[in-house]
Image: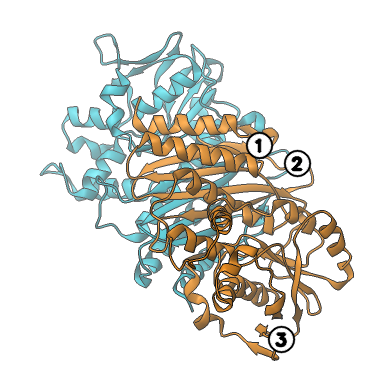
Chain colours: A cyan, B orange
Amino acid sequence: MGEFELIGRYFRSVALEGAGSPEHVTLGIGDDAALIAPAAGKQLVVSTDTVVLGTHFPHDYIPANLAYRAIAAAVSDLAAMGARPLSFTLALTLPEVDESWLQSFAEGLTDAARDHRISLIGGDTTRGPLNINVTVFGEVRPRNVVRRGDAHAGDLLCVGGPLGDGAGGLAVALGEHLPGDISDTARDYLFQRFWRPLAQCDLGLELAGVASAGLDVSDGLIADANHLAQASGVALHIRVADLPCSEALHAWPQAQRREWMLGGGDDYVLLFTLPVASISCLDVWSSLGFGVKVIGEAVAGSGIWLDDGQGLEEVVVHSGFQHFQGGGNV
Amino acid sequence: MGEFELIGRYFRSVALEGAGSPEHVTLGIGDDAALIAPAAGKQLVVSTDTVVLGTHFPHDYIPANLAYRAIAAAVSDLAAMGARPLSFTLALTLPEVDESWLQSFAEGLTDAARDHRISLIGGDTTRGPLNINVTVFGEVRPRNVVRRGDAHAGDLLCVGGPLGDGAGGLAVALGEHLPGDISDTARDYLFQRFWRPLAQCDLGLELAGVASAGLDVSDGLIADANHLAQASGVALHIRVADLPCSEALHAWPQAQRREWMLGGGDDYVLLFTLPVASISCLDVWSSLGFGVKVIGEAVAGSGIWLDDGQGLEEVVVHSGFQHFQGGGNV
């Protein structure tokens, strides 16, 4: 058996074990391509996302975690659009075939597929420097799609969960900038948040047809808010005191927390605008257990404006936060 | 403007200039994901393909050619299934932002999109060792899909065009193993065949609902015939004397031509089985200008059998031709 056939065998087991809902798949792994169809009245949503080992990335990673994170990051883009995740393809470039690495990677892939209720439908393996590309497919009714460009002045600005955990989790994973008194609980929580983020798919389904605009926080709150503001042609006001922050992050000084919440990235929580007419949804979501918080509002104008308690100040996005971005969707 | 936003700008221009048929795209570049739908009664076909600079790859490449080849290789998988190509996403990992490289790459992308009548609908850019992943989307009526596993004993085995040009083209591109008397015409033809292959989409549409099984020759004739034979549970007999060979390859000795035609790979011509009841299609295709040749037949049994003029001999696929494979679809 050739070594790349071996890889194929690992992936086939993921495809079989994945607890996805493959009723939309007519033809999957093993042919030149997969054949898929959205349900009647729905359209297919497609997003692609790549993970490489960069300079600011933990190199002593567990392959299962790497796989999990790659899937979650890609699925988060579907959640942001209000789509139900269905399936994914994996294009894996590997420098060598290492059976124990593959075994672990396949386990993480299986976990992520189960947790996000998606199935592997195809892929490609290539020899080269490590590169993990995941393309995810979801379905949505076209009129319910949550886009970036439809926020209006007067809408509330909301986030779906705590901010800054991605950056705090990276610090834990790298073992850098750790306060001496950080608890094991906080450390474990943040490690999990970095390596095993769960895309907010259920919240995304709630937002479909309700939120006026939205995306997921992957580049950092300011950078992603700026994407939304620019696409919608509005200004966004953000009240720093209202930003949700996990208990674990309180091990760090307030200035560090603030930097991570505003610019850290990799949080994979949803950032969206809600028309005031739908404000009653906030109570419904709260009763359902979603941690949605109102953090500001959209107003006429442009730019991102922070309210630190002493009035509004515009953020210079490109100089202040640009350096957190290591890439981007086009 | 951040450097990765710059890349986004290049890709947006491709999306706008591409002469694709974006009526299936509701929402493309600029949001977290693209929204696409196959036409009524059709399903979406998805395939993903990665290109890296490997050890046996010309390193003095022109970026435009690299882009063209990546697209054509991916679209070829759609052609193999009888699908009409619609669109693609591009996940590009780059070590650095080089404007002249990007300019050239975008030109090749635009050429390939136009020639294959597809449009760019989304993508992702990441910093890291060069890696080009293309995921292509096409549409097909489910009952017309050409799979790998439906060949039957008695079917004719056919190829859609000349074999060995991919390997001959690589030799030209690398400047290796060149006969002293190779003409400029042959050299130019093979260089183009390597860098600018045109996926056989029009032929694929003819095969939809007609061919019993098929795939594209990317790993080499023997290796790909073996995929088809194994998936279908048949043996394939191949008459070496009937393999179509371009005029350009005649610059090399017969033994070299034979090796390249059987094992070279990267030809991106279709390999398919045709029920004898549909034999009249051969004349139709010939009149339409398709270079389809019958090269053998499917018979009961297993394995790949070569007829070199002195009777049949079974090919040991794994030892003889496996080394030509640098990766594979799962």
Three-letter amino acid code at disc 2? Ala
Circle nearer the N terminus (1, 3): 1
| The quarter of the displayed image where residue B24 is located | top right
> To which residue does mark 2 refer?
B39
Q: Secondary structure at mark 2?
A: loop
Circle nearer the N terminus (2, 1): 1
Q: Nearer the viewer, mark 2 or mark 3?
A: 3
> To which residue does mark 1 refer?
B20
Can residue B67 be seen? yes
Q: Nearer the viewer, mark 2 or mark 1?
A: 1
Residue toward you, A254 or A73? A73
Please check whether the numbered discs 2 and 1 fall on a single chain.
yes
Vertical arrangement, residue A312 with respect to residue A45, above or below: above
> Percent from the top left, x then y, of residue A271?
43, 29
Report whether A218 appears left or right of A151.
left
Could you tell me which residue is drawn at 57 percent across and 26 percent down?
A: A210
Q: Residue furthest front?
A: B181
What subunit carries mark 2? B
Q: CA distance from mark 1 to mark 3?
A: 44 Å
Three-letter amino acid code at disc 1? Gly
What subunit carries mark 1? B
Check the picture and name the quadrant holding the C terminus of chain B: bottom right
Three-letter amino acid code at disc 3? Gly
Q: Are marks 2 and 1 in contact (CB under 8 Å)?
A: no
What subunit carries mark 3? B
Circle nearer the N terminus (2, 3): 2
> Percent from the top left, x then y, of residue A10?
48, 69
Q: Secondary structure at mark 1?
A: loop
> Percent from the top left, x then y, of residue A64?
37, 60
> To which residue does mark 3 refer?
B301
Could you tell me which residue is drawn at 32 percent across and 22 percent down?
A: A242
Q: Residue furthest left?
A: A180
